Amino acid sequence: MPATAPAHGHSLPATLGGLLAHRAATTPDAPAVVAVQGDGSIDALNDVVTVYSTYQPVLNFITGLLESHKAGKALNTRIHVKQVTGGGYQWFIDDSPGSLRSNLRMRYGELVQGYRIMPFGDDWATRVDAIGRDKDGLKVRYSSQQAPGMDEATWGRWDYPTFIDGISDGSDLARRGKQLAVSISLLGRKLGLGLRSGVLQPRDGYDLMDRFPVEIQHGSIDTTAYGHDGEWIVMGITWQALQRGDLNTTLTLLPKESGTSPSADLLVTQPISSQREWQVGWAPPNPLAATARYWLDQSSGDVYELTDGATIVDGITSETT
């Protein structure tokens, strides 16, 4: 569906309101926009947008405008639909919703009974190299944006290339690149928590976009070193009622886009050992000549391990003791 925007130079709330109103008027059963601004339906977004015309899906176009508005400023801008009193539905755009829920701290061993986490992930990067194409023509623009708080002298330079179509100008591309750089540089984006069954219910003292402190200190995992003040944002809530009576709540979490930087202690390296791991021979090892950690006697199949300076059969492939 084409997005026909209001006259150029309008504020971002007015532009979004016009787009949503156009969609409501041309799409059957679409949520209506009762008011653009002033009744709380659309927050005051302090941006001016110049749009003459464009042709792309309305909601995709609006999402791009909101990403440009966020511009790496730690805003959790959200567009959603609510049922209004008297019937019908209405669009709402919240600029930076959510509150910190310190009373619902997600600590491993308490409310959290299991977890799955990837600190970095396959798409983690410290910099975004954005290629953009203007919506009003074929001009191609480029913008490289480094993630704030990620010193490339410490973490290295990890580039993430991306293509963004339908940008307004170079500033628009830079703002969208900044937002993407912030989001992909966060540690702990791939976090799954196994919560104690039946304890936490959907919206039980919390809501979407609220922030939870997450503390997992188990083995090599320490989420307090991941930065962003150790807080994750609730982006989705799933509730399951099983036939055997279990009531399970699953939270989709993403790290907060502001706060402390990750600790460089996560990059602690171990000294490289010059000792060879394996040596192979046709006889038991000579204690004066064998220097590897393991020795394989191919005649007998015995494997010897160097322990406290003595090479002994360790029982890996042999029952000899």
Image: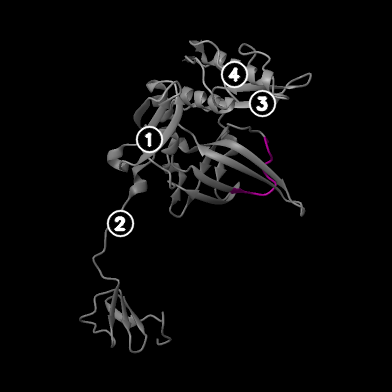
Residue drawn at 76 percent across, 55 percent down:
244
Name which residue type carries label 1. Val
Q: What's the distance in space between the residues labelled 1 and 2, CA to CA?
A: 30 Å
Of the residues under marks 2 and 3, which one precedes in the sequence? Answer: 3
Of the residues under marks 2 and 4, which one precedes in the sequence? Answer: 4
The residue indicated by pointer 4 is: 19
> In which quadrant is the C terminus drawn?
bottom left
Which dot marks residue 71? none
> In which quadrant is the N terminus drawn?
top right
Name which residue type carries label 2. Gln
Which dot marks residue 81? 3
Residue positioned most to the right? 86
Q: Is residue 170 left or right of residue 87?
A: left
Q: What's the distance in space between the residues labelled 1 and 4, CA to CA?
A: 29 Å
Q: Are marks 2 and 4 in contact (CB under 8 Å)?
A: no
Secondary structure state at the residue bearing disc 4 = helix
Where 110 sits versus 313, above or below? Answer: above
State whether residue 259 appears in this view.
Answer: no
Q: For the image shown, how many numbered marks are present on the structure?
A: 4
Q: What's the distance in space between the residues labelled 2 and 4, CA to CA?
A: 56 Å
Q: What's the distance in space between the residues labelled 2 and 3, CA to CA?
A: 52 Å
Question: Which region is colored magenta?
Answer: 194-204
Residue drawn at 46 percent across, 24 percent down:
68
Residue 56, image x, y percentages: 54, 26
Mark 4 nearby-residue class (10 Å; few <14, some 14–19, many ≥20)? many
Mark 1 nearby-residue class (10 Å; few <14, some 14–19, many ≥20)? many
Q: What's the distance in space between the residues labelled 4 and 3, CA to CA?
A: 15 Å
Which dot marks residue 270? 2
Name which residue type carries label 4. Leu
Which dot marks residue 128? 1
**SS assignment for the magenta stretch, majority:** loop
Q: What's the distance in space between the residues labelled 3 and 1, CA to CA?
A: 32 Å
